[in-house]
Amino acid sequence: KLGVSYYYKPYKLQLAAEFASDNYGTNLLRFGAEYNIYEGLYLRGGIDNLFLNKSDEPVKPSVGFSYSRVLGNYRIGFDYAFQVEQYSSSDRHIIGLNFIFLKLNKKKKTIIYLRFSFNNPGFILSISRR
Protein backbone atom coordinates (compact mmCIF):
# COMPACT_ATOMS: atom_id res chain seq x y z
CA LYS A 1 0.00 0.00 0.00
CA LEU A 2 1.05 3.54 -0.66
CA GLY A 3 -0.95 6.52 0.50
CA VAL A 4 -0.75 10.29 0.48
CA SER A 5 -2.81 13.01 2.08
CA TYR A 6 -2.91 16.79 1.95
CA TYR A 7 -4.52 19.20 4.39
CA TYR A 8 -5.71 22.40 2.71
CA LYS A 9 -5.82 24.71 5.72
CA PRO A 10 -7.76 27.71 4.30
CA TYR A 11 -10.75 25.44 3.63
CA LYS A 12 -10.20 22.97 6.52
CA LEU A 13 -10.20 20.16 3.96
CA GLN A 14 -8.21 16.90 4.15
CA LEU A 15 -7.74 14.99 0.88
CA ALA A 16 -6.36 11.45 0.79
CA ALA A 17 -5.53 8.78 -1.80
CA GLU A 18 -4.22 5.24 -1.50
CA PHE A 19 -2.88 2.72 -4.00
CA ALA A 20 -3.03 -0.96 -2.99
CA SER A 21 -1.58 -3.97 -4.74
CA ASP A 22 -1.56 -7.62 -3.69
CA ASN A 23 0.23 -10.83 -4.69
CA TYR A 24 -2.65 -11.84 -6.97
CA GLY A 25 -2.15 -8.89 -9.31
CA THR A 26 -5.04 -6.81 -8.03
CA ASN A 27 -4.41 -3.05 -8.12
CA LEU A 28 -6.89 -0.57 -6.74
CA LEU A 29 -7.24 3.05 -5.73
CA ARG A 30 -9.10 4.67 -2.86
CA PHE A 31 -9.93 8.35 -2.54
CA GLY A 32 -11.42 10.32 0.30
CA ALA A 33 -12.04 13.80 1.64
CA GLU A 34 -12.85 15.18 5.08
CA TYR A 35 -14.22 18.66 5.71
CA ASN A 36 -14.14 20.28 9.14
CA ILE A 37 -17.44 22.19 9.32
CA TYR A 38 -16.75 23.63 12.77
CA GLU A 39 -14.98 22.61 15.97
CA GLY A 40 -15.45 18.87 16.45
CA LEU A 41 -17.76 18.19 13.46
CA TYR A 42 -16.39 16.56 10.30
CA LEU A 43 -18.06 15.42 7.07
CA ARG A 44 -16.44 12.63 5.04
CA GLY A 45 -16.84 11.07 1.63
CA GLY A 46 -14.88 8.56 -0.36
CA ILE A 47 -14.58 5.98 -3.09
CA ASP A 48 -13.28 2.46 -2.39
CA ASN A 49 -12.51 -0.42 -4.78
CA LEU A 50 -11.62 1.61 -7.84
CA PHE A 51 -9.90 -1.33 -9.54
CA LEU A 52 -7.30 -0.56 -12.18
CA ASN A 53 -7.26 -4.02 -13.76
CA LYS A 54 -10.85 -5.26 -13.27
CA SER A 55 -13.49 -3.27 -15.08
CA ASP A 56 -16.38 -5.48 -13.92
CA GLU A 57 -15.98 -4.64 -10.20
CA PRO A 58 -18.16 -1.72 -9.07
CA VAL A 59 -16.82 1.01 -6.81
CA LYS A 60 -18.04 1.45 -3.22
CA PRO A 61 -18.96 5.06 -2.46
CA SER A 62 -19.31 6.10 1.17
CA VAL A 63 -20.30 9.16 3.18
CA GLY A 64 -20.22 9.86 6.87
CA PHE A 65 -19.62 12.26 9.71
CA SER A 66 -18.03 12.39 13.12
CA TYR A 67 -18.49 14.60 16.11
CA SER A 68 -16.27 14.80 19.17
CA ARG A 69 -15.97 17.05 22.15
CA VAL A 70 -13.36 17.56 24.87
CA LEU A 71 -14.69 17.22 28.39
CA GLY A 72 -11.93 17.80 30.94
CA ASN A 73 -9.20 15.24 30.23
CA TYR A 74 -11.44 13.23 27.90
CA ARG A 75 -12.46 13.45 24.26
CA ILE A 76 -15.74 11.69 23.53
CA GLY A 77 -16.84 11.13 19.95
CA PHE A 78 -19.41 9.51 17.70
CA ASP A 79 -18.83 8.26 14.14
CA TYR A 80 -21.33 7.27 11.47
CA ALA A 81 -20.64 6.07 7.93
CA PHE A 82 -22.82 4.74 5.13
CA GLN A 83 -21.28 2.55 2.42
CA VAL A 84 -22.98 1.19 -0.69
CA GLU A 85 -22.61 -2.60 -1.01
CA GLN A 86 -23.44 -3.81 -4.52
CA TYR A 87 -23.28 -7.56 -3.81
CA SER A 88 -25.21 -7.58 -0.55
CA SER A 89 -28.89 -7.48 0.30
CA SER A 90 -28.32 -4.25 2.21
CA ASP A 91 -25.85 -1.39 2.43
CA ARG A 92 -23.54 -0.89 5.42
CA HIS A 93 -24.22 1.47 8.30
CA ILE A 94 -21.08 1.80 10.42
CA ILE A 95 -21.42 3.31 13.90
CA GLY A 96 -18.65 3.90 16.40
CA LEU A 97 -18.12 5.50 19.80
CA ASN A 98 -14.72 6.93 20.73
CA PHE A 99 -13.34 7.58 24.20
CA ILE A 100 -9.93 9.21 24.31
CA PHE A 101 -8.36 9.65 27.73
CA LEU A 102 -5.86 12.49 27.77
CA LYS A 103 -3.35 12.42 30.60
CA LEU A 104 -1.38 15.63 30.46
CA ASN A 105 1.82 16.48 32.23
CA LYS A 106 4.51 19.06 31.57
CA LYS A 107 6.96 16.73 29.81
CA LYS A 108 4.88 14.26 27.81
CA LYS A 109 1.34 13.80 26.66
CA THR A 110 -0.19 10.32 26.98
CA ILE A 111 -3.19 9.49 24.84
CA ILE A 112 -5.28 6.38 25.49
CA TYR A 113 -7.69 5.76 22.63
CA LEU A 114 -10.61 3.36 23.10
CA ARG A 115 -13.05 2.75 20.25
CA PHE A 116 -16.14 0.58 20.16
CA SER A 117 -17.81 -0.37 16.90
CA PHE A 118 -21.35 -1.70 16.75
CA ASN A 119 -20.75 -3.40 13.39
CA ASN A 120 -17.75 -5.49 14.47
CA PRO A 121 -18.40 -5.82 18.20
CA GLY A 122 -15.21 -5.35 20.09
CA PHE A 123 -12.84 -2.69 21.27
CA ILE A 124 -9.75 -1.10 19.78
CA LEU A 125 -7.26 0.17 22.34
CA SER A 126 -4.13 2.14 21.54
CA ILE A 127 -1.76 4.08 23.77
CA SER A 128 0.72 6.70 22.55
CA ARG A 129 3.12 9.10 24.24
CA ARG A 130 4.17 12.41 22.75
Image: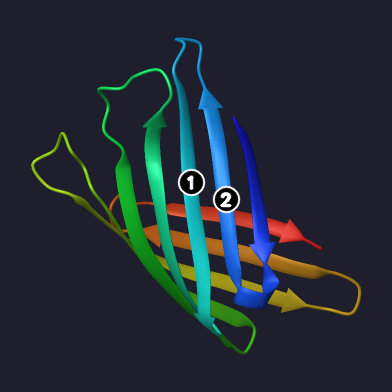
What residue is shown at x 34% (from left), y 19% (from top)?
54
Quarter of the image with the N terminus is: top right
Q: How many numbered discs sit on the rendered protein?
A: 2
The image shows residue 105, relative to residue 108, as above or below, that is below
- The image quadrant that residue 79 belongs to is bottom left
Residue behind mark 2:
16
Q: Amino acid at mark 2?
A: Ala
Neighbourhood count class around disc 2 (C-alpha, 10 Å): few under 14, some 14–19, many 20 upward: some
Neighbourhood count class around disc 1 (C-alpha, 10 Å): few under 14, some 14–19, many 20 upward: some
Mark 1 residue element: strand
Residue 86, percent from left and from top: 18, 38
Residue furthest bottom as drawn:
72
Numbered badge on residue 120: none
Residue 84, percent from left and from top: 23, 48
Callouts 1 and 2 close, C-beta under 8 Å = yes
Q: Amino acid at mark 1?
A: Phe
Mark 2 residue element: strand
Quarter of the image with the C terminus is: bottom right
What residue is shown at x 26% (from left), y 33% (from top)?
58
The image shows residue 39, relative to residue 119, as above or below, that is below
Residue 76, percent from left and from top: 49, 78
Residue 89, percent from left and from top: 8, 41
Residue furthest top as drawn:
24
Residue behind mark 1:
31
Lower position in the chain sequence, tag 1 or tag 2: 2
The image shows residue 77, relative to residue 39, as above or below, that is above
Disc 1/disc 2 C-alpha distance (Å) = 6 Å
